[in-house]
Structure formats: C-alpha cells, structure tokens
Amino acid sequence: MVSFQRFWTKREIIWRFHHRKWQRRALFILGGLMVGAVAIFIAKAADLAQVLFQQLIAFIPWAPLLVTPLGFGVSAWLMTRFSPHARGSGIPQVIAARHFQDPRLRKDFVSVKTAISKALLLLLGLACGASTGREGPTVQMGAAVMFFFSRFTPIRQPGFLLAGAAAGIAGAFNTPLAGIVFGIEEMSRSFESRSSGLIIGAVVAGGLTSLAILGNYNYFGTINLGLPFGYSWLAVPLCGVVCGLMGGLFARVLILLPDHSRWSGKAWILRNPVVFAALCGLGVAIVGHISGNHVFGTGYDEARRILHVGPTADGMASMPADVGFSFGPLKFLASLLSSLSSIPGGIFAPSLAVGAGLGADAAWLFPDTPLAVLALLGMVSYLSGVVQAPITSFVIVSEMTQDHALIVPMMLASLIATRASKLISPQSLYHRLAELMIERIEPHTTSPVEGAGANAHASPATP
C-alpha cells in the first residue's frame, strides 16, 4: 500500500512539473501574440499622429514654433506627474527591470500603467513633431505585456521580460531574426539556452500576428544592390568611422546629461524638467523649419525616399531634391534634442534616418556608387555607433531591405562604427542609462548591470 502511494505521488510530481512547463510555454506564445498586436497598433497610431502633424504644418506653416515646444512641455509634465518610468526610449527600463530580483521593483518599470502611459505620451510627442521612434517604446510595452502574463505562473523569470523585448522589436520592424539577435546581444548580452526556445516562440508568435494582419512586407521595401570590389569599397570604412563617431557623440551626450554631477546646468534641468523639455521642443521646431519640415517624426519617409531614389540621366547618384544633403546633420540635431528632453520616444527609427542621410552625403566622393548602397552603409554604421550592438544593427538593416548582397560590407561597417563609437562613448548607451536608474533605487549598488559586460562598468556619481 505504501509503495502504491509513493508511485502515484511520483506520478503526480512528474505531471505537475510538465504541466507547469507547458503552461509557461503557452504563456510565452500567448504573450507573443499580444505583443505583436500591440506593436501593430502602435505602428498604425504613430503613422496617424505624424499625418495629423503634417496636415497641421500644411495648413499653418508656423505652427511647429508653438505646438512643438508646448507639446514637449505638456508631455514632460504628464510624465513627471503621473508616470516617471515612461521617460525616454524604454529599453533601459527593461534592462533595469531584469536586474531587480524583487517583482515589486520590476513592476515599476514594466507595469500596465507604465505601458499605457508610454503609448499615449509617445503618440502625443509624434503629433507635436518630436524626432522620435516607436521601436524602443514598443520594447518596453512588449516587456510589460509579458510581465503581466508571468503573473499566472509561479516561476517569474526575467526570461519573460527578455522575450517581450525581443518580440517588440520583431513586431515593430517585422524582423523576427533581428528580434532574437537584439534579445541576446543588447538586452541580455549573453546566451541562455534554457530560455532561448521560449524567446524564439514568443518572437514567432509576434511575427505571425504581424503577418496575419499586415501581410509579408519589408520595412523599407526590397533593395537588391551589391558593392563590387574597387574604389567604392572605400565607402565602407569612411561610413563606419564618420557615422560611428557621430553615433558615439549622440550616445555620449545622452549619458552625460544625467551622469555628469559636476555640470552646473544639471541641477537647473532637474528642477525645471518641463521648461527644459519645452526649450528642446523649440529647438526641434527651429531645426525643422530650417530643414523644410523634413526632420519631424520618425524619419521613415525620408529614409525610404533616399533608398529608392533613382540615378540621374548621367548615371550618377542623386539625393532627392526635397530632402537635400543637409538632412542627415539636421535630423541628428532634432533627434538629439528630442532625446535630451526625456519625453517618451525611441531612437531606432530616427537613427536609421540620420544614418541614411549621412551615408547619402558620401555621394560627393562616390558619385558612381548607388545612393541606396551608401545610405544602407550609413544606416548600419550610425545605428551601431549609437547602440554599440553591431550584430543587431546589420541584421536589422538587412532584414528590413532583404539586401543580402550587402551583408559583408554592412558587417564590416558595423564593426568599424562600433570601435569608432567607443572612442567617444566607452560605455553602452542603454546599459549605462539602466545603471543610472538602478543607482537611484539602490544607491549602494556597485556591481554592473547583469550581462552588460565591460561596456557597463559602474563608476560614475549618482545623478
């Protein structure tokens, strides 16, 4: 009788183990489907917000000088008053949330309230002309969705947050492979074999949602261009160095603002975040007016036009007349001011637009090289310089364009850009910002963010 009871006790233990295992897998898949739906909703709403702002400009050309600073100020006030963890990109918040062992601390960064606030304030910023993207916020919202589903399993693993972040990138760009690489290289900076299958399942679920609703599409359309050996290959190190340095400068400024305790202006900004955001918005409006209203929003339309513009009658590369060769530097300034304001918004899409503009400027030196090739090299180089994640950068750009012929040049450009970026910004942007968030909550923390590696050592003063 005793052995019979022991037998069924073992059977019950095994059944419960497998039940929980499959329950966790089902939650990952269900969460991935929900993240895909959220990504599609944010994409459509963001496009509508930008259309409304462009219609306002068409009706009242001087409107950005009033609407943009006012919108920045209102967004900063709402964020500071009701949802301080919705600030900025959203990716550092997810990295910080994975660091905490206490679920209550994690919830502050990836709660449903924070996700909803992030979405609404992101759309408000885009409707007012902010040079921001939706991909970083989608990562935070994806992590929030997965964190919500983790409540229904007794094992609340950080893998849920990682899967949500990866599915968010995959759903935002329709790039499932880049979502997986982003989760491994940027979010965790390590490979966890135990959770890799679950992460892939969540990414696949998010991708299937996008495929079912939007169909099979490429973010920037299909481009099939190569880079034959010869003089044109000099564009690879040139774009890598120049765009990498510019990306490093962008990251360095964003890190220094909250990190440099000896800067006298920091105290004023902390006391007057709304006024500072409004001033940044005024700067964006002025830069937008100089650019002919081309630096507002994500920059998707301008980057796409650069990639798909045809050569002139003599076969030379030609920049779209309505964009101009000043687009890259001006978009850089608008994106920098938008990020410095700390209003909710990502940097992925604007970084791709800046890179496309800077790469296209190299047409002066390489007139026989297709403009799209130069733009793609600039995109992968500048993005690598900003986030210092070279694999994610060239995978995401190649997936968005399906240009496999440029894989090797883009890989080389991304590596060069990452090394050039480290000359200006030795620390990784997302991981350093995550460290600063952690230090505010745990002032005595001396260890680096988990998985950050050498790029995220803890050395600065608490902001």
Image: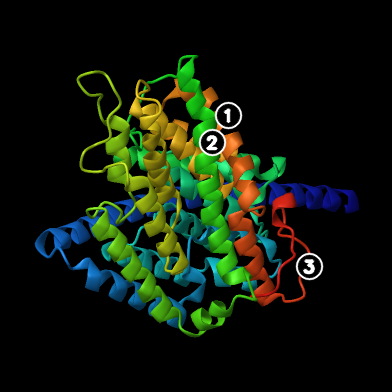
Tell me the kind of residue under disc 3: Thr
Taking the view exactly as shown, the residue that stands out farthest to the bottom is 271
- From the image, state whether disc 3 or disc 2 is nearer to you: 2
Residue at the spot of label 1: 412
Residue drawn at 68 percent across, 62 percent down: 99
Tell me the kind of residue under disc 2: Gly
Q: Is residue 375 above or below residue 102?
A: above
Closest to the observer, 153 or 70: 70
Residue 279 in picture, x, y percent from top left: 37, 74
Closest to the observer, 74 or 217: 74
Residue 325 in picture, x, y percent from top left: 31, 41
Residue drawn at 34 percent across, 36 percent down: 220
Q: Earlier in the sequence, mark 2 or mark 1?
A: 2
Residue at the spot of label 3: 446
Question: Quarter-wise, where is residue 110 in the image?
Answer: bottom right
Left or right of 103: which side holds 406?
A: left
Question: Quarter-wise, where is residue 199 in the image?
Answer: top right
Q: Is residue 434 above or below residue 451?
A: below
- From the image, state whether disc 2 or disc 1 is nearer to you: 2
Q: Earlier in the sequence, mark 1 or mark 3?
A: 1
* Residue 42 seen in render: yes
Marks 2,1: beta carbons within 8 A: yes
> Label 1's element?
helix
Residue drawn at 39 percent across, 80 percent down: 275
